[in-house]
Image (cartoon, rainbow, N blue to C red):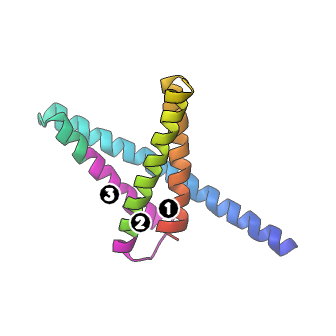
């Protein structure tokens, strides 16, 4: 029984540590994405749609690299994991949109509150799917 409890504690600790790292990566991605968007739009007069796409692509690439090598310390196949990373993103984003629509569109919750709550759902789903599918 003691071994079970020890294993449970270790798993909880490792997962919590990974979730915190995942959050840090998310903050870094936001900074990278917004910086690129603002620099391209404001200093180089790049159209806002193109700036937005380039910023999000950079954040997405950074997210994959940091989560692969730092958050989950995966040594798996980069191509296979990148495909899973894209699939996980699309699933997480789809679930986030459903939750957002349900909260704001059906239940008439405040739009900002609905965005925040659905973003929390996205983060948890994205973390779990990446942990158990992409970087297992």
Instruction: Give neighbour class at mark 1: few <14, some 14-19, many 20+ (Cα, 10 Å).
Output: many
Q: To which residue does mark 1 refer?
A: 130
The residue labelled by disc 3 is 61
Residue linked to disc 2: 84
Marks 2,1: beta carbons within 8 A = yes
Q: Earlier in the sequence, mark 3 or mark 1?
A: 3
Coordinates of residue 10 in the picture (x, y in percent): 71, 66
Whole-percent x, y for residue 34 in the image:
31, 38
Does residue 61 lie above or below 98 as drawn? below
Q: How dense is the environment of label 3, judged by Cα within 10 Å: few (below 14), some, or many (20 and up)?
A: few
The span picked out in magenta is 55-80
- Judge the density around disc 2: few (<14), some (14-19), many (≥20) Cα neighbours within 10 Å: some
Q: For numbered disc 1, what is the local secondary structure?
A: helix
Please identify the quadrant where the N terminus is shown: bottom right
Image quarter for residue 77?
Answer: bottom left
Nearer to us of marks 3 and 2 is 2
Q: Residue at x 32, y 45 (%)?
A: 32
118 is higher (above) or lower (below) than 59: above
Q: Residue at x 46, y 67 (%)?
A: 134
Q: Position of residue 88 (x, y in %)?
A: 44, 58
Q: Is residue 37 left or right of residue 94?
A: left
Q: Which mark is residue 12?
A: none
Quick one: SS at disc 2? helix
Image height check: is 76 above or below 90?
below
């Amino acid at each position: 029984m003691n071994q079970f409890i020890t294993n449970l504690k270790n798993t909880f600790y490792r997962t919590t540590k990974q979730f915190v790292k995942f959050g840090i990566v998310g903050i870094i991605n936001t900074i990278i994405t917004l910086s690129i968007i603002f620099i391209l739009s404001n200093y180089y007069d790049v159209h806002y749609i193109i700036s937005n796409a380039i910023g999000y692509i950079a954040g997405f690439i950074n997210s994959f690299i940091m989560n692969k090598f730092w958050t989950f310390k995966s040594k798996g196949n980069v191509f296979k994991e990148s495909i899973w990373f894209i699939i996980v993103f699309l699933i997480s984003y789809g679930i986030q949109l459903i939750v957002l629509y349900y909260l704001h569109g059906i239940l008439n919750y405040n739009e900002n509150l609905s965005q925040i709550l659905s973003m929390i759902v996205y983060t948890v789903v994205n973390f779990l799917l990446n942990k158990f599918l992409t970087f297992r």
